Amino acid sequence: MILFLAASPSLDLTYEVDRLERGGVTRPRRVTAVPGGKALNAARVAMALGGAARLVAPLGGATGRRVAALLAEEGVGARLVEVSGETRSCLAIVEDGDRPTSTDLYEASAPFVEGEWRALAEAIRAEGADAAPRWLALSGSVPAGIQLDELGELLREVRAASGARLAVDSSGAPLAALAGIADLVKVNLGEAAELLGAAPPDAAAACAALAERFGTDSVVTDGVRGAAALLGGVGFAVAAPRAAGRFPAGSGDAFFGALLAALDAGHGPGAALEAARDAAERNAAVPGQGRLA
């Protein structure tokens, strides 16, 4: 069982257009909406691949109600916490052409107000006790109003109570605050460089530096050049994508969800990384983040 913590869920929208007319009117040919944000996308992929997953997420306003309804339609098990701020929307505008492009617009999450972090923390504790997860996964950004030291203490508490391993897929200050307590970190090469304060020459070097600095297993992706991993002291190379899909938004989330699902099922690191690579490619082939072709 994987318990995903979704501090910053969203309604993810994909607009397919012939061409984005800057300064003019563009009419989408098709719009795809999914319950999104990194953790929700990863959880849905894990479940699509046969994994057992649940999530805890704060939702607010009309957009939050729509996200909750979409989660229910897709059969995603979730413990939802009502908050006052409107749940954000994130938009991917995908243009046609010989070299299709995706222009992504991501809103920031509404800040938590007094009492909301306490309610979310209690929901995480309760879900951790009920679900008895083997993996605890924090994925995505952390809204203002959540103190990172308190978040770290909560994750330590839930991990100790459940015996779960902690996986983190984040960036910036949350990643810096949690990397030292994580069992597994999944980042891209730019995020690794920011965390380390220096630019590693490649993904494999970044994995080695993360292990030395934080004592954690890691997977570092590098776009079309593939990825590298250092798991249990063993290095792995992940081949570049076989094809560039038209819908790259959410492919990193698909990678993370598939990786954890495979590891949770008892597959070895090599097989888990191959499953993650395949899921990322399948996500990029169809509209809708966290969906697989």
Image (cartoon, rainbow, N blue to C red):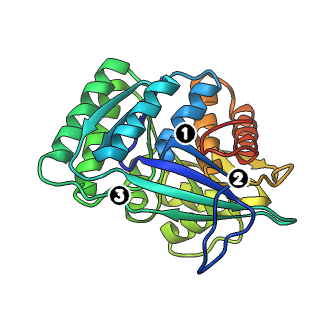
Q: Is residue 183 left or right of residue 112?
A: right
Q: In percent of the image, x 64 and y 43: which residue is there?
A: 255
Circle 1 residues within 10 Å: few <14, some 14–19, many ≥20: many
- Of the image marks 3 and 2, the number of the one nearer the N terminus: 3
Residue 78 location, x and y as percent? 38, 28
Q: Which residue is mark 2?
A: 247
Q: Which residue is mark 1?
A: 42
Q: Secondary structure at mark 3?
A: loop
Q: Residue furthest bottom?
A: 23
Q: Which residue is mark 3?
A: 109
Residue 187 location, x and y as percent? 57, 56
Circle 3 residues within 10 Å: few <14, some 14–19, many ≥20: some
Q: Secondary structure at mark 2?
A: loop
Quarter that holds the C terminus: top right
Q: Secondary structure at mark 1?
A: helix
Please tell me whether residue 266 is drawn above or below residue 204 in the rendered image. above
Number of marks in picture = 3
**Residues marked 2 and 1 touching at CB (< 8 Å):** no
Please tell me whether residue 6 is drawn above or below residue 68 in the rendered image. below
Between the residue at mark 2 and the residue at mark 1, the CA separation in whole angstroms equals 16 Å
In the image, what residue type sits under mark 2? Answer: Phe
Residue 103 location, x and y as percent? 63, 66
